[in-house]
Amino acid sequence: MADAVVFMNPVPSKAPQISAFKFLKVIAVSFDKISIISSSLDDTEDANVINVKYKKQSNKVLRIINFIWFQLKVFLKAMITLKKGDTAFFWVGDKMFSSMLLCKLKGVKTYFFLYGMTSLENASKKAQTTKKSQDFLASKADFVCAESKAVLSDRGIELSDKTRIIHLYVDDLEVSPKRENKVGMLCRLASGKCVLESIEGFNEFHSKHPEYSLEIVGDGILYDECKALISKLNAESFITLRGWLLHDELFEVMKDWKLLLFPTKTEGMPNSVLESMSMGIPALCSPVGGIKDIIKDKNNGYVLKNDDAESIAQALCEVLSDDTLDSVSASAKATINDKFTLIKAQENFKSQMGF
């Protein structure tokens, strides 16, 4: 077996690291040695971690200088690490321009991963720039990868001999024997996750079903706005903002949930949906990105028709009154066991890579 090098953007929080380390486990059995080059990563037994210092700057000029300096340092680190015959993966690597250049200079085979398009969440300059950099680096890679066929099709990319579908896995999580009348949300608190619409929708739903409550796990730029909206609606007694939770704390909270509410404008293969399904918690989701390849309406989950407050309220009423909720819960768990275990993910990776 050959060696692999994974290139990843500087890590702003623990969330991207979780998915990256899962990716390392998926590919670990297929390579003699794996190195991962990024910034602020923890150590892991599955790879040689190479951190390149990267400091965020508020000043625009300093930010540009810092970014260029980071590219140079990554190039030099990769020059030492990367050798001809290796395989290079760009996992959340849309900022790793110098790495792609070096791979081309050394004739290293490159695999670039695409995810949900943040440009569909908002029209900000940052989101548009991210999409452009993703499209550019994907065009330079030897192979374009995604965790789902639908992620590629949403970007107008057809399956070909230059595309690969490589997904992650979910740990086998315990199914709680008894759940409370709780709905959960697990997401970034951002406009693209329709969290404000969800709060309004749940408030409307609660007026007809006062026995239910909503727990929102996550953090983001809309945290204060969400808190203010809950207060305005006098909903503090039945809508709770829990903020960001560590995984062990998260699963302790989730075990009481009867349903995961997951409206979103764009998505790759959402780990929060997969983890909920592994716990036997069906998801009520928007049909976007990789969700379209996972959720079968009223079989192993539920599909939202729209992501406005009225549609969310109506969907909650229908789903939580459905007497097939238990069978959908069992099908959700079965979906994970059939496809999204670590062994299944490793087998799929070998198949897609031709190993």
Image: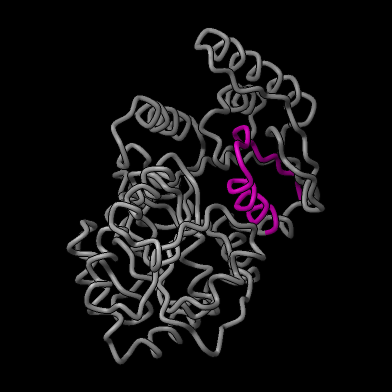
Left or right: 236, with 88 as reference point: left
Residue 228 percent across, percent down from the top left: 36, 47
Q: How many marks?
A: 0
Above or below residue 175? Residue 274 is: above
Q: Nearer the viewer, residue 20 or 240?
A: 240
- Taking 71 as reference, is 86 above or below it? below
Q: Is residue 42 magenta?
A: no
Residue 13 part of the magenta-drawn span? yes
Q: Residue at x 36, y 51 (%)?
A: 193
Question: In which quadrant of the rendered view does residue 337 lie?
Answer: bottom right
The spot of residue 110 in percent (x, y) is: 58, 37
- Scheme by which the image is coloured: one colour
Instruction: Please say if 106 is above or below 317.
Output: above
* Position of residue 112 in the picture relative to residue 41 (left or right): left
Nearer to me, 91 or 265:
265
Q: Residue at x 65, y 71 (%)?
A: 343
Closest to the observer, 308 or 222: 222
Residue drawn at point x = 46 percent, y = 57 percent: 241
Horizontal side, residue 72 vs residue 253: left or right: right
Instruction: Name the residue furthest top.
Output: 61
- Stretch of the chain drawn in magenta: 1-25
Q: Which percent across, then down, holds residue 119?
A: 33, 37
**Picture quarter with the C terminus:** bottom right
- Using the image, determine if residue 257 lies above or below residue 312: below
Q: Residue at x 28, y 57 (%)?
A: 233
Closer to the camera in the image, 46 or 60? 60
Task: Give the quadrant of residue 284.
Answer: bottom left
The percent coordinates of residue 186 (x first, y second) are 47, 60
